[in-house]
Amino acid sequence: MAGVRAEQKAGRRRAVREPRPRRTRRSQGSAHAPSSAVPVAASPSEEPEAPRGEEQPRGHDLETPEPTPPPTAPRGRRWTRRLLVALWVLVTLAATAAVSVPWVPGAVDAVPDWLPPAGSVTITTCFAFGLALRTGGRALVAGGLAAVLSTGSVASGTPVVVAAAAIATAVLAAVLGVMATKPAARFAAVVRECVYAVLVAVVGALAVVAYDAPLSAVRAGYVVLALSLLGALSLAYRLAAGLHGLGRRGVVMVLAGVGLLAVTLAYTAALTRWGSPGVRMTFEDTTRWVRDLLGAVPRPTEFLLGIPALAWGVSTRARRRQGWWGTAFGAAGLAVVSATLLDPGLSLEEAGLRTAYSLLLGLALGYLVIRADRFLSGARGRRARRLEEASAHRPEPGRTQALL
């Protein structure tokens, strides 16, 4: 096709026909004018001619090229990440089996004494590595430092150092369980993310007991709760772009979470320490009756605050990043799970039932919170909810990729 120039630069463009020079009467007259005629001065509207060495851009050179898509990761790098994730999962599962040996009847005498502490050290190292990788830190440095410190604490045998390693493992399990979640638009996906987070906290609880540290269950529980909540809120501050991204409902949710946590802890402490004998007797009788009926008593901090906040946060993150604040409050419930086996009078069966009941009640309450939030935001009716779920596609990095 005559007059059409081929593409010479990167980017998709249409083939553009070169503009023909417009012929005017002046140009026609100048073609027949004698060479001795006085040259006519160019008008101000006419563009000056380009120098002979340079060529003016014309045609497709004047078009703005379309943005090229971002480069994809090389196949070798993707396979390296997959192998690293698979190795991390296999090592964590092997360490979980090692710390679970003391809970298997008849298997204690068949294994060496160093196996459970070695499993707990491995879990601490894997959790530190995974949390650093998820939050954009130096994973090798964090994992290596955790391995050195936890191994040194077990080798030294000092009670304070071993207790510090056990508490650090519980905190890592609670924060990693929160950070390992993904946004979920539908409630089935919300249930899946909450189960994943609780499983991470359960593995941390088994590792904490394997350290065999001389700890007070009540004091250690408070320390793990405070440190886990502080660490999760600090990460949520960065992931949610500070406090200005909270919004009205986010502020109400954060204030309600802080108030509910304070009331739960204060009421429990006041009831067990300064309550009247009649009130304490009634509380103990009710707890005993529930334990005899169900086999365990759910934990208020977990099913009233931790799991509902985690469910609401995971659901909200599919639309707005302010959901990270609710997800961070889920660390309160996961901290209770990771420190639950520190109570020497609690069996593994009862601890598992308490966690399961708290998870079920918390998910039911979280469903009501999510539905109330959708109702207040205007999504009323099944069709409106389905449309909102279909449009909830806020992107976030994958579960094995860095968030920051």
Image (cartoon, helix red, strand yellow):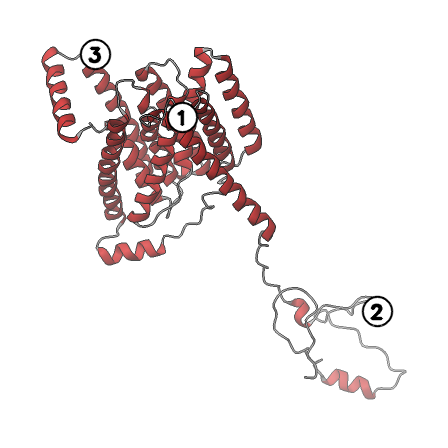
Residue identified by numbered label 2: 52
**What percent of the width, then of the height, locates residue 225?**
35, 23
* Amino acid residing under circle 1: Ala
**Label 3 SS:** helix
Q: Nearer the viewer, mark 3 or mark 2?
A: 3
Please name the residue shown 58% across and 59% down the image. Answer: 67
Counting residues from the start of the chain, the first of labels 3 and 1 encountered is 1
**What percent of the width, then of the height, locates residue 343?**
29, 19
**What percent of the width, then of the height, locates residue 276?**
13, 11
| Mark 1 residue crowding within 10 angstroms, few (<14) / some (14–19) / many (20+) | many
Q: Which mark is residue 125?
A: none
Residue identified by numbered label 1: 207
| Real-space Cα separation, disc 2 to disc 1, in angstroms | 79 Å
Residue identified by numbered label 3: 273
Please name the residue shown 46% across and 14% down the image. Answer: 161
Please name the residue shown 63% across and 67% down the image. Answer: 63
Residue 233 visible, this angle: no
* Amino acid residing under circle 3: Arg
Residue 401, placed above or below residue 131? below
Q: Nearer the viewer, mark 3 or mark 1?
A: 1
* Amino acid residing under circle 2: Arg
- C-beta proximity under 8 Å, tags 2 and 1: no
| Real-space Cα separation, disc 3 to disc 2, in angstroms | 96 Å
Residue 125 visible, this angle: yes
**Label 1 SS:** helix
| Mark 2 residue crowding within 10 angstroms, few (<14) / some (14–19) / many (20+) | few
Counting residues from the start of the chain, the first of labels 3 and 2 encountered is 2
Q: How many numbered marks have been drawn onto this rendered protein structure?
A: 3
